[in-house]
Image (cartoon, rainbow, N blue to C red):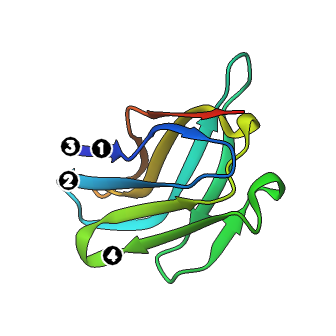
């Protein structure tokens, strides 16, 4: 079993910054990619950013230049630095991790429980 726990969400004014963290714990044999998704009110869940084990990154067009994803492989933790926040960034943010989390050896995608980010205008 693996658990992903997000932290760092909250309420911020437009133009402000927040940094989200997501730590994986439990049975972890390997983690490949890690990422952040978000789901706004009345919207589908969408990819915000992802990062490979080697550090290659991918961003949604809507956050390029404002958000930065990073990870600490030694701590099994992924971060999302969010700058110049806009009201449309308001959403529940979820982290995920693609890896091997049991001795059966299968790759699965694990999800965190989500953290609320609210940006006021």
- In this view, the residue in front, 67 or 78, is 67
In what quadrant of the picture does the N terminus appear? top left
| In this rendering, the label closer to the viewer, 2 or 1 | 1
Q: Are marks 2 and 3 in contact (CB under 8 Å)?
A: no
Do callouts 2 and 1 mark residues in contact (Cβ within 8 Å)? yes
Label 2 vs 4, first from the N-terminus: 2
Q: Which residue is mark 1?
A: 5
Give the alpha-carbon distance from disc 2 to disc 1, as whole Å.
Answer: 8 Å
Looking at the image, which residue sits at the far left? Answer: 26
77 relative position to 115: left or right:
left
Tag 2–tag 4 contact (CB < 8 Å): no
Of the pair 18 and 38, the residue shown nearer to us: 18
Secondary structure under the numbered disc 1 in the rendered image: strand
Disc number placed over residue 73 in the picture, else none? 4
Q: Residue at x 75, y 35 (%)?
A: 88
Whether tag 1 and tag 4 are in contact, CB under 8 A, the answer is no
Discs 2/3, front: 2
Of the numbered discs in the image, which one, if any, rests on residue 1?
Answer: 3
What is the spatial separation of the Cα atoms under label 4 and label 3, in whole angstroms?
18 Å
Q: Position of residue 42 (x, y in %)?
A: 73, 16
Q: Earlier in the sequence, mark 2 or mark 3?
A: 3
Q: Which residue is mark 2?
A: 25
Q: Quadrant of residue 28?
A: bottom left
Where residue 40 sits: x, y (%)? Answer: 67, 27
User: What is the CA distance from the residue labelled 1 to the residue labelled 3?
Assistant: 13 Å
């Amino acid at each position: 079993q693996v658990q992903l726990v997000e932290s760092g969400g909250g309420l911020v004014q437009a133009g402000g910054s927040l940094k989200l963290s997501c730590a994986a714990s439990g049975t972890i044999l390997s983690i490949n990619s890690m990422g952040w998704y978000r789901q706004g009110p009345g919207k589908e869940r969408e990819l915000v950013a992802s990062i490979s084990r080697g550090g290659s990154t991918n961003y949604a067009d809507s956050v390029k230049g404002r958000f930065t994803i990073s990870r600490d492989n030694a701590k099994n933790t992924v971060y999302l630095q969010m700058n110049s926040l806009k009201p449309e960034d308001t959403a529940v943010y979820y982290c995920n991790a693609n890896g091997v989390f049991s001795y059966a050896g299968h790759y699965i995608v694990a999800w965190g429980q989500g953290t609320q980010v609210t940006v006021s205008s």
